Image (cartoon, helix red, strand yellow):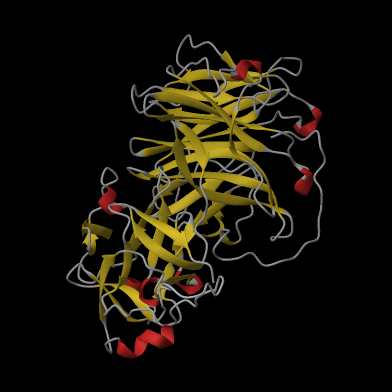
Amino acid sequence: MKTRISALSIALVLTASAATAQVGSPYIHDPSTIMESNGKYFTFGTGVDGLMSEDGWNWHSGAVRPHSGAAPDAVKIGDRYLVGYSATGGGLGGGHAGRILTMWNKTLDPESPDFAYSDPVEVASSRADEDCDAIDIGLFLDPVTGRLWCTYGTYFGFIRQVELDPKTGGRVAGAVDKNVAIDCEASAMTYHNGWYYLLGTHGTCCDGVNSTYNIVCGRSRSATGPFLDNMGRDMLKGGGKMVAYAEGRRIGAGHFGHTIIADGVEKMSFHWEADMDLSGRSTLAIRPLLWVNDWPVAGELFEEGTYALISERRGYALELEVDFVRLNAGRGRGGPDPGPIALEDQKLEDVQGGWPEGDVNIRISDFMNRPHQLWDIEAVPEAGGYLGGPYFKIVIRGTERALTATADKEVKAAAFTGAPEQLWRIDQLTDGTYRIMPKEVPGTDEELVLISIADSTPTLGKFDFGSDNSKWQFKTIRK
């Protein structure tokens, strides 16, 4: 976190769409990696305490940590949580002398009887005239070797890396701080498919809607670098491939955090320096994390609209199991050429009179842009959400015939009531396709998703990222 630019106060008071931004009071600066503890989600920010959420979508104050400080981070090691923070530095208080400290807790839930932080331990420091500023800690537990790494630093000098002891949270005896990057701050590390990634936040901070923060990265086969970008530029020489940047009315992406939910289901967290729909304040952001040619890319939140739901298995569309009604349009053989004539789409009122009353089965078939294949997808704000998104209802366009999970682990279309089996979470996967999961399946606690077990047969089953049966695409329908 840099403070060489004064914060900008703006007075924009608008309402954010429930489908495109975290809801509640998601106001935070320099958020730590999101941690789950006791079924709740927690993230800490610069200053005192941080945010918590019961569902991962609706955020409010409630994360607690002592000692104040700047730009914290957190990692779970075994059954404990290690939380790190900066005591000073970053130009705070007019100086660049800084200290990085870590402390343990058995839980991050302040309502738990086990909630108690250990005394902080210093793991790194910087002098006022040193070419590194000890602030903006990033904690990384190597999933391959079990080694624990700490990165820190700002634009004032180098980003440095030092090894910590995963048992004590302190420095490994004899560990030497190593320069790994420059021209960035808010560093973090992560691992994917044999590569180690160093992420940093580039650009200017703390200037509200004028901040130029963006997240960049380099990668290496070694946890200690060198970290090169897609053009072979070393991050020690200012390299960095873009990961996330401004998005519409949300400005200044910074402070990367990585959360793996399941194989192929990953999220990245960060803050917007300014959300112009939330008074220009710094807010928490959560996006799908995609991997394109083994490079991290910020995905997109799913947006409301009218779609065809296309199975990745064959490219067929999800539809009501009703009789196919032919369009009454000639093929124009022979005779004089009348010129181009735009034919009308088949309308709902032209066909729904022949549909059965009550519940209707679901199948998959060739997409023909017909009413029984077009789905309106809308957020249901009162239903809450999950990490990075609200629950949606999925109904045939112009009707209340909703996609519904059944007790026999199948799907049907039934009148929408708002029941949990009619609420769907939509996660963009790391390859850009989507997972579609009901909030609940009647009669079971199993986590099941919409799958295609045959070219024409949708059902509910276990998610398998390695199978196209579990993956879907959403084709936008022009209204």
The N terminus, quarter of image = top right
Where does the image place residue 283, in percent across and percent down from the top left? 64, 52
5, 76: nearer the viewer: 5
Residue 17 vertical position relative to residue 171 in the rendered view, above or below: below
| Image quadrant assignment for residue 169 | top left
140, 194: nearer the viewer: 194
Q: Residue at x 28, y 90 (%)?
A: 357
Position of residue 382 in the picture relative to residue 440 (left or right) = right
**Residue 118 in view (yes/no):** no
**Residue 246 in view (yes/no):** yes
26, 470: nearer the viewer: 470
Where does the image place residue 433, in percent across and percent down from the top left? 40, 50
Instruction: List the single residue furthest toward the front.
Output: 335
The C terminus, quarter of image = bottom right
Q: Residue at x 36, y 85 (%)?
A: 351
Where does the image place residue 104, in percent across and percent down from the top left? 45, 35
Position of residue 461 in the picture relative to residue 125 (left or right) = left
Residue 464 vertical position relative to residue 380 in the rendered view, above or below: above
Position of residue 216 in the picture relative to residue 470 (left or right) = right
Where does the image place residue 315, in percent across and percent down from the top left? 33, 55
| Image quadrant assignment for residue 229 | top right
Q: Residue at x 51, y 47 (%)?
A: 299
317, 247: nearer the viewer: 317
Instruction: List the single residue furthest toward the left.
Output: 408
Q: Residue at x 57, y 60 (%)?
A: 20
